[in-house]
Image (cartoon, rainbow, N blue to C red):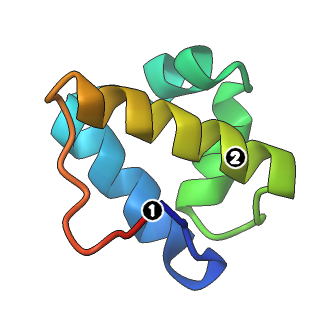
Amino acid sequence: MNLQLENFPERVRDIRGQLRLSQEALAQALGVSFATVNRWENGKTTPSRLARKQVESFCEKMMKQGKLNMAGDHK
């Protein structure tokens, strides 16, 4: 899976929507602050390489559990 920066805000919103998580809950699951997730979604900041890897790892875990569908992504 590779989350591209140009569509990162939309992907974060999609991930939260599919998992029915608030920004706060997603932030907690990723080990970042609520403000960080909020800024990502609003396109005010871009995630670091480490943060993108954290999000990708979280998404892979959720996909393996059948909770998330990331159609169109390739590992």
Relative horizontal placement of residue 51, taking residue 73 as reference (left or right):
right
Q: Of helix, strand and loop, which one carries label 2?
A: helix
Q: Residue furthest bottom?
A: 6
Q: Nearer the viewer, residue 38 or 68?
A: 68
Q: Which residue shows up at 17% across the image and 29% down it?
A: 67
* Residue 51 is at least partly visible in this image: yes
Relative horizontal placement of residue 60, taking residue 18 as reference (left or right):
right
Above or below — where is 62 with respect to 37?
Answer: above
Residue 33, percent from left and from top: 73, 25
Relative horizontal placement of residue 8, taking residue 63 as reference (left or right):
right
Q: Which residue is mark 2?
A: 53
Do the residues under discs 1 and 2 have CB atoms within 8 angstroms?
A: no
Q: Which residue is mark 1?
A: 75
* Residue 48 is at least partly visible in this image: no
Question: The residue under label 2 is which amino acid type?
Answer: Lys
Q: Of helix, strand and loop, which one carries label 1?
A: loop
Above or below — where is 7 with respect to 51?
Answer: below
Q: Nearer the viewer, residue 72 or 11?
A: 72
